[in-house]
Image (tube, helix red, strand yellow):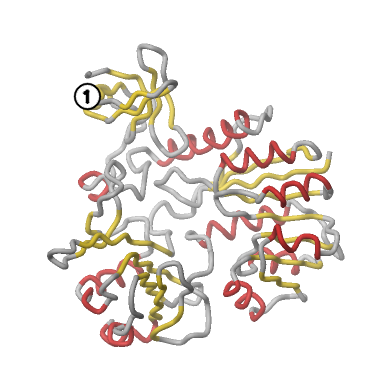
Amino acid sequence: MNDVVAITSIAAGGDGVGRLADGRAVFVARTAPGERVRLREGMKLHKRFARGELAEVVVPGATRVTPPCPHYVQDHCGGCELQHLSYESQLAAKRTIVGDALRRVGKLDIGDPDIVEGVEEWRYRAKISLAVKSIARSGRRTIGLHPYDRPASVFPLLNCHITDFRLMALWRELRSRLELLPPRLTRLTLRLDREGRRHVVAESAGDPWTNAAALRAALPGGENVICWWQPVDGAARVMAGPATGFPATAFEQVNPEMGAIARHWAVEQLGDVRGAVVWDLYGGIGDTAVLLADRGAHVVSVDADEKAIDWARRRPVPAPVRFIAGKAEDVLPTLPEPSAVVVNPPRSGLHRNVTLRLAGQPVGRLIYISCDPATLARDVYRLGVNYHVTDVRAFDLFPQTAHVETVAVLEAA
């Protein structure tokens, strides 16, 4: 089959969308709106849709550009999905992805939201996680990223164009010293913290990482590097470098600058919170809690990550904040009644019990910060029994990828 398909839009996940002759939607990676493309044989047909592989761009779209990253083209890197689109087209696609999810899943009568473009289109990531593929018979291993069309494979990474230069400089040094990493390495994460230190988190099976101190000593600027060992399904601990300071395993936006912009806008939508009790659920290391405290709120911040909460408790805050380590769904019955709530859940969205609590006992204003439009839309629909959405704004925290951050403002009905 050598079908020629007209691509009309970009779907959640970054694939271009067209229609087959029988009316089924077909999803094709690395295509752009306005293009006519030829598909390879072997299309995967499902009852209501299909997935095709690009064979040839017959008529290029006006928004197609040349991707600057060689890995994107040569290795089919799955870390980015939209490098072949102009940045303006990426922003338009993300607005549509959010709007479509809220209309289709959230059942809202709403247009595509405004989007705040990224401060930087490149070199914004303060964290990169690398996959490891080992060949048992030879003992060789490849460390890098997965191709989007062969997710079980790993290609060796030379340079990630969306990752901070300082982390890529660290990776260049590490590549010549891989023998000092754990022998049964399963994942390697590099992270830059807000204090400018660089972290190497080695996840492995088997014995602890015994060469961590040797690796740190061999790295240029190694005094500014902290090495962590994380056993598979276990808790990470520092193996070389200071054990105090920012916890490299705690959640923080990979684009800290844009994360701060989104967070400030979210908190501003609460209006005057002086003297009010405000819940900060899934609060991580306390960034939102600090902003709320600075505005005079009585803040209760909850997160399941004990390391994140421990660091948050030791950071300077403008007013006392009650930081609680625990799952939001478990601790809600113990919290004081709030006047407003901010939630920033993981990609899976709100736990059902959190949704039931917020819907059953609505607060005046609820701010939902989301990294996944689909679960945001699902939760907004569930909360719709006692809330209505008054504003939505998207933020491009992840240029060159199909991911988008969204902030929704809900008020009690």
Q: Is residue 256 left or right of residue 197?
A: right
Name the image quarter holding residue 179: bottom left
Residue at 32% across, 39% down: 84
Looking at the figure, which quarter contains the N terminus? Answer: top left
Q: Position of residue 286 (x, y in %)?
A: 65, 68
- Pick the front one: 323 or 170: 323
- Pick the front one: 62 or 386: 386
Residue 131 higher or lower than 305, as above or below: above
Instruction: Estimate how packed mark 1 is, as few (under 14), some (14 to 19) or many (20 or more) residues with alpha carbons within 10 Å.
Output: few
SS class, disc 1: loop
Residue at 69% across, 69% down: 290
- Pick the front one: 162 or 133: 133
Name the image quarter holding residue 239: bottom left
Q: What residue type is labelled 1?
A: Glu
Looking at the figure, which quarter contains the C terminus? Answer: top right
Q: Position of residue 129 (x, y in %)?
A: 37, 62
Residue 184 higher or lower than 77, as above or below: below
Residue at 55% across, 50% down: 347
Question: Which residue sits furthest top?
Answer: 22
- Pick the front one: 32 or 4: 4
Label 1 sits on residue: 41
Name the image quarter holding residue 22: top left
Q: Where is residue 393 in the image (x, y as percent from the top left)?
A: 62, 43
Residue 133 higher or lower than 324, as above or below: above
